[in-house]
Image (tube, rainbow, N blue to C red):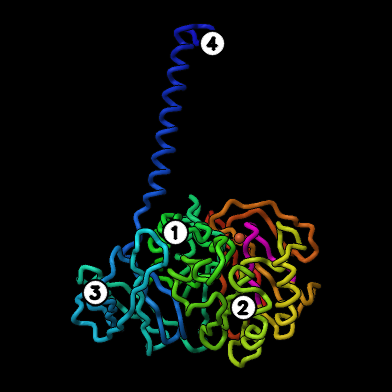
Amino acid sequence: MIDRPGNPVLRSRGILGALLLLTCLTGLALFSQGCHAQAAPPFNHPYLTWQGDPCTTMTVTFQTATVPKAVEVRYDSASHAGKPDDYPGKAAGASHQVDGLVDKRSINSAELSGLKPATRYYFVFQAENGEFSKEYLFETIANDERMIRFVDGGDVGEFPSVPGLFRSAAAQNPAFVEIGGDIAYEGGNLDEFATVDAWLNLWTEGMVAPDGRLIPLVAVIGNHEVNHESGAKERRAPFYYGYYPQGGKSYFARDFGPNLRFIALDSDHTVGHAEQVGWLKEQLQAPGGKHRIASYHVPLFPSHREFTGGDSEAGRRLWMPLFDQFHLSLGLEHHDHTFKRTKALRAGEPDPAGTVYLGDGCMGQDPRDVDAARPYLEKASSTRHFWVVDVDAEKVSCRAIGDDGKVFDACDVK
Ligand SMILES: [Fe+2]
């Protein structure tokens, strides 16, 4: 039989086929929505952050459905194959709940302190049923001249590209991964907890170094961490403050050994630019931290959005003079969903002794168009990527890696 559109049998078969296809697609859509809404919470999957010195502390967090009787992490610099009684170190922690979160889950954290730098630690933690977890491991940061590597990315979410990008980032064996805002895209909305669950599942599954080490998270705040409520910052960004213990602030500085002072800033999501100026100056002028690198969400030198955007302008007016005065090595910028590298800039003008700004947050999100004609840009494109940053006493080496796992840009700065 010849397949002719005029044939009534074939036409009815075509209509039936189309109906069948429509039913399947609707079913798939409902199924995927259902999966999204019911993303399994990351209960009993530990993740790591810092509240203090990354050379001597580590904070272990795990979530549970109910409040455990006790929060305890047991640890040692030797493996004990998960036998809880064999770990001499014990760190007691605390549980809290996020106000208004409907499932009333428990967020359990313990800070391990007094650790040796550049040391691998093995740990287990007590789950809500009183039993101990399997053994996990982390490594403290070296407090000496050896090179430190970290990854920067932003605007992540739970998009299909994220698992591959996370795998690729973890394969670089970074000491930590810093997300420069717009982490899960729940918008600070308590009803969207499943979105954060899905993101945390991707994180805990993906951010494991080749040797099994858990990679710590440094979380910088972005506009999609924040809702439209008023009141305390913890209410406006409930997951950012509630899930990732970092000392209770959205701006903080950490020295990763003598060569890297990492400064996280809040580009007016829960704290305004002006409020951080005095503190930022102290961090930039204090001794130590040979290379100072700052990360914040809204770019001072955007590659997609308007140059005159309010938070970009505020960053240039209030923070940039300090970046210039105390020589910030790198400004890590996000929010625009593009790849960009600026020229070295002082006061916004090309100057070899100035600061290079890298961005612009595209570690999962769909890339946007760039305005490559802007005079401050050295290079820009619509490319998903993350940055790998190697810091030693001499220089800061940066490589951009795309979602094909390949390096497509590199630069050295001082
Ligand atoms: Fe953003």
Q: Which of marks 3 and 1 is in front?
A: 3
- 304 relative to 180, above or below: above
Residue at mark 2: 293
Residue drawn at x 36%, y 75% is 109
Kind of residue at badge 4: Pro
Verify whether residue 339 appears in magenta: yes
Of the pair 334 and 274, the residue shown nearer to us:
274
Q: Which quarter of the rendering shows the N terminus?
A: top left
SS at mark 1? helix
- Whole-number angstrom distance, CA of label 4 to CA of label 1: 49 Å
Residue at mark 1: 196
Residue at mark 4: 5
Q: Which residues are drawn in magenta? A: 330-343
The residue positioned farthest toward the bottom in the image shown: 287
Residue at mark 3: 69
Instruction: Report whether residue 211 is seen.
Output: no
Of the pair 369 and 96, the residue shown nearer to us:
96
Image-quarter location of ligand 1: bottom right
Q: Do the residues labelled 3 and 2 touch (CB within 8 Å)?
A: no
Instruction: Tell me which label, 2 or 4, sits earlier in the chain.
Output: 4
- Whole-number angstrom distance, CA of label 3 to CA of label 2: 41 Å
The part of the image, by quadrant, that contains residue 153 is bottom right
